[in-house]
Image (cartoon, helix red, strand yellow):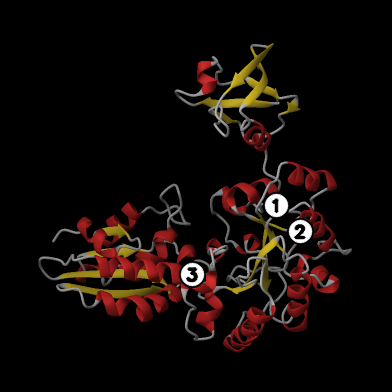
Amino acid sequence: MIEIKQVLKDSIAEDLGMEQGDKILSINGNTIEDFLDLHYYESEPLLVLIFQKDGQNYEIEIEKEQGRALGITPSRDDMTTCSNNCIFCFIKQNPPGMRRQIYVCDEDYRYSFLQGNFVTLTDARQEDLERIARQKLSPLYISIHATDPQARKQLFQFEDYIPILEKLEYLDQHNIEMHTQIVLVPGVNDGEILEKTIKDLYNFKNSIKSVAIVPVGLTKHRKRLPHIDPVDRELAQNVLEKEKVWQKKYRNNEEENFVYVADEIYLLADQKLPQAAHYADYYQIENGVGLSRKIIDEMLDNIHKSSYSPKSKTKILLVSGVLGSKVLREYVLPDLQKVPNLELNILPIKNKFFGESVTVSGLLTGQDIIDQVAEQSSQYDAVFLPPRCINHNGVLLDDVTPEEIEEKIGTKVVLAGTNILEKMSYVKN
């Protein structure tokens, strides 16, 4: 059973008199054990629902539109956490003193389906796989890293080989769409091991839509963890040369690219980013695959469509991660510099919090921005922040808000989007 945390206004549940604290026992004879069961079984147009109020069970028949939800927010059960001991785990490289959620290693296939979180399926039991197949929890996002047994033991720190291909085969047989990733660790799963992994995954091309290769992320807080070399320019160039071969050799069942390389590898190799068509439906954009191209295209499109220009000379400082600033300078800045009365400069923020090897905008902290912007901020009318450094609660990783940054530096702070000119309306002109 699940307990109701909230009943939404003007919902079916409200019409039925359900309230916070009531419990959903079953729908159409299926026991409701968690929020995913509710999500799956409530979609049917005809429901026989049994719920409990004040210790008394009630059975109700409901006729509704296909797919319409009951309007219940259930109390969430505990998230399944990871039992792996991966040598590259980014969570274990976080500094102390951050909010609790940042230290949670998620390994819950339910959130892989609902939110696109990557899981390894290490702890997925047969009954879990059967549930995935039965409820068609598709697509799933799965971390593979390597299919070679010895490489997997080294990466995951298993004592024994934990099979993955057997689980992928089961999901493939039940038509579960999958997107997979390989975190590239130099000297461990590159070279022939990488080739084998891609070849093995291609056996499931009918279900696996994409394989993403992303560089290992390393912070300065790797205490008591094995030494790992970063992906350097030479390895990045080597991977991109192989990508050309993989594009011809491996196609998914929709004749799209099967293997994709993260934007960061292109930038490390000093190579041009591919055009949008390369990324098909941007299957792994949240994994940093094609994100730069999408942002570039949206920004340029917005610039070209806009006729806006400031009425008087306006100076904007756009802060970004080191890699992001490289993209903006090369692809976007030349067009922005053509806007009359607008002077825009880009400042790459070095990541002192995690270490300067971390170069993405999404991992910037408020304090690093304050420290590196404060001295020159008075020269500008506003400082624009990259949108991906702010979470859904409106704070950066160190819980600093844009408002606090503004107070510290004494200059207007604006959260930038892909339409920078539209955001100029927040700046006094």
Q: Residue at x 20, y 73 (%)?
A: 339
Q: Are marks 1 and 2 in contact (CB under 8 Å)?
A: yes
The front one of 57 and 305 is: 305
Q: Helix or strand or loop: what does disc 1 sit on?
A: loop
The front one of 284 and 79 is: 284
Dot label at residue 107: 1
Residue type, numbered disc 3: Val
Q: Measure the alpha-carbon separation of dots 1 and 2.
A: 9 Å
User: Residue 248's spot in the image, x, y percent?
Assistant: 65, 81
Residue type, numbered disc 2: Asn
Residue type, numbered disc 1: Glu
Question: Which is more N-terminal, label 2 or label 1?
Answer: 2
Q: Are marks 2 and 3 in contact (CB under 8 Å)?
A: no
Question: Which is more N-terminal, label 3 or label 2?
Answer: 2
The C terminus lies in quadrant: bottom left
Q: Which residue is mark 2?
A: 84
Q: Which residue is mark 3?
A: 360
Q: Mark 1, residues whose alpha carbon is within 10 Å: few (<14), some, or many (≥20)? A: many
Nearer the camera: disc 1 or disc 2: 1
User: Residue 215's spot in the image, x, y percent?
Assistant: 61, 74
Dot label at residue 179: none
Farthest-out residue, front: 254
Q: Residue at x 62, y 87 (%)?
A: 241
Residue 99 located left or right of residue 422: right
Q: Residue at x 25, y 73 (%)?
A: 344
User: Residue 293's spot in the image, x, y percent?
Assistant: 45, 72
Q: Residue at x 29, y 58 (%)?
A: 414
Q: Is residue 8 visible?
A: yes
Question: Which is more N-terminal, label 3 or label 1?
Answer: 1
